[in-house]
Image (spheres, grey):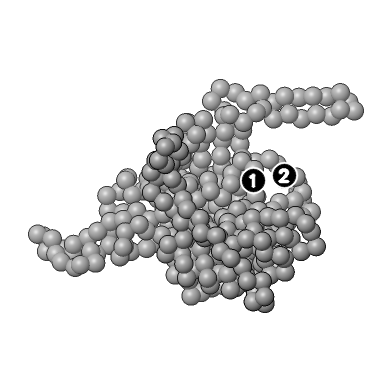
């Protein structure tokens, strides 16, 4: 991570529920909760309490219909930072104090209006920070919703799908805690490589109940893989689109697909895992991204507030990648 440039990944953020028929809150509803948690200084302890996460800052742009979150992580196990000037023979170790951790800051932009024709899905871009992968952003946001669910017995309530009244004559209510799911959009490079490269293998992966394997108690069945034969004479021109349709048609049984191919003009082979239902890559390196360069003033390793001049450079790219 350099002080004059940053990379941002593009995700589809879905607000989901594990209960059939549950009412799904909007992003606007969630922002009220995130603001409340930020104001209260609510933190999420992870890694056996050696690290903590929180929302450090929030800014809402009502006119352009998006919000910016600053996600912060303090990691006690991270090494002390060091600055040096070898020519001047300067070497400084900046020792962390008691109960202090190395701080990481990550800017996250989220649309407050859902994607056109995709209910409960919002465009989201996440700054690439080595200490805060997208999976941790997802965990934090979902955990804060879980905190709200347990703090307020009336939160996330909705009329029972079956109708009916209570003894007091009021509508019967149901509750369900929502959660956030992030799915990376496939990069243009991934789509081009699959369409133009040499496909060497395609398989569908099904999760299995974890059961011991006969004759080896220390080994347990976890998943099974269905390898598919490729008819190279009949590969369609837009292979990526055809594969997406095939994977989605089998997503009810096989939740993950694997595609192996040789990169065009290169002997290097790669294998990418894909969510069968959505077509989103499960490996961060294949997620669509963009770079912001020549940033000035230069950026620090972390920050306590949203960096306005960085966010302002990100906004045009963010808006160009959403459809509302």
Which element carries disc 2, helix, strand or loop? Answer: loop
Point 18% across, 64% down: residue: 171
Specify which label sits upstream in the sequence, 1 or 2. 2
Point 62% across, 60% down: residue: 201
| Residue linked to disc 1 | 129
Residues under numbered marks 1 and 2 in contact, where contact means CB atoms less than 8 Å apart: yes
Instruction: Indicate left or right for 55 with 215 as reference.
Output: right
Q: Which mark is residue 163?
A: none
Tell me the quarter of the image containing the N terminus: top right
Res. 159 visible in picture: yes
Foreground of the two, 77 or 317: 77
Point 65% across, 28% down: residue: 79
Tell me the quarter of the image containing the C terminus: bottom right
Point 13% across, 60% down: residue: 166
Res. 314 visible in picture: no
Which element carries disc 1, helix, strand or loop? Answer: loop
Position of residue 138 measured from the top left corner of the image (x, y, whole percent) = 50, 50
Q: In the image as oriented, which residue stretches furthest toward the left? A: 167
CA separation, marks 1 and 2? 7 Å
Q: Quadrant of residue 191?
A: bottom right
Q: Quadrant of residue 190?
A: bottom right
| Residue linked to disc 2 | 1
Foreground of the two, 220 or 247: 220
Instruction: Indicate left or right for 22 with 110 as reference.
Output: left
Task: Please say if 243 is above or below 211.
Answer: below
Instruction: Assess disc 2: are there few (<14), some (14-19) or many (≥20) residues with their C-alpha within 10 Å of its C-alpha.
Output: few
Q: Quadrant of residue 20?
A: bottom left
């Amino acid at each position: 991570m350099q002080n004059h440039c940053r990379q941002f990944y593009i995700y589809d953020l879905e607000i989901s529920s594990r209960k059939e028929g549950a009412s799904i809150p909007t992003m606007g509803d969630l922002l009220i909760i995130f603001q409340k948690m930020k104001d209260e200084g609510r933190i999420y302890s992870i890694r056996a309490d050696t690290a903590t996460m929180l929302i450090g800052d929030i800014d809402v742009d009502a006119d352009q219909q998006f919000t910016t979150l600053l996600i912060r992580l303090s990691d006690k196990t991270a090494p002390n930072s060091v600055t040096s000037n070898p020519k001047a023979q300067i070497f400084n170790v900046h020792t962390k104090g008691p109960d202090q951790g190395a701080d990481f800051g990550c800017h996250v932009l989220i649309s407050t209006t859902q994607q056109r024709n995709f209910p409960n899905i919002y465009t989201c871009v996440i700054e690439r920070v080595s200490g805060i992968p997208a999976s941790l952003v997802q965990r934090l946001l979902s955990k804060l919703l879980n905190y709200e669910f347990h703090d307020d017995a009336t939160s996330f309530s909705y009329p029972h799908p079956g109708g009916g009244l209570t003894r007091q004559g009021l509508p019967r209510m149901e509750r369900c805690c929502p959660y956030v799911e992030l799915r990376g959009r496939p990069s243009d490079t991934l789509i081009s490589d699959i369409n133009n490269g040499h496909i060497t293998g395609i398989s569908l992966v099904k999760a299995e109940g974890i059961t011991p394997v006969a004759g080896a108690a220390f080994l347990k069945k976890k998943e099974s893989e269905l390898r598919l034969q490729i008819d190279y004479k009949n590969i369609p021109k837009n292979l990526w689109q055809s594969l997406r349709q095939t994977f989605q048609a089998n997503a009810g049984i096989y939740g993950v697909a694997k595609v192996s191919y040789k990169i065009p003009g290169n002997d290097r082979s790669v294998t990418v895992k894909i969510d069968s239902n959505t077509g989103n890559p499960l490996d961060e390196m294949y997620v669509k991204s963009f770079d912001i360069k020549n940033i000035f003033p230069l950026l620090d390793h972390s920050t306590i507030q949203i960096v306005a001049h960085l966010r302002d450079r990100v906004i045009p790219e963010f808006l160009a990648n959403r459809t509302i």
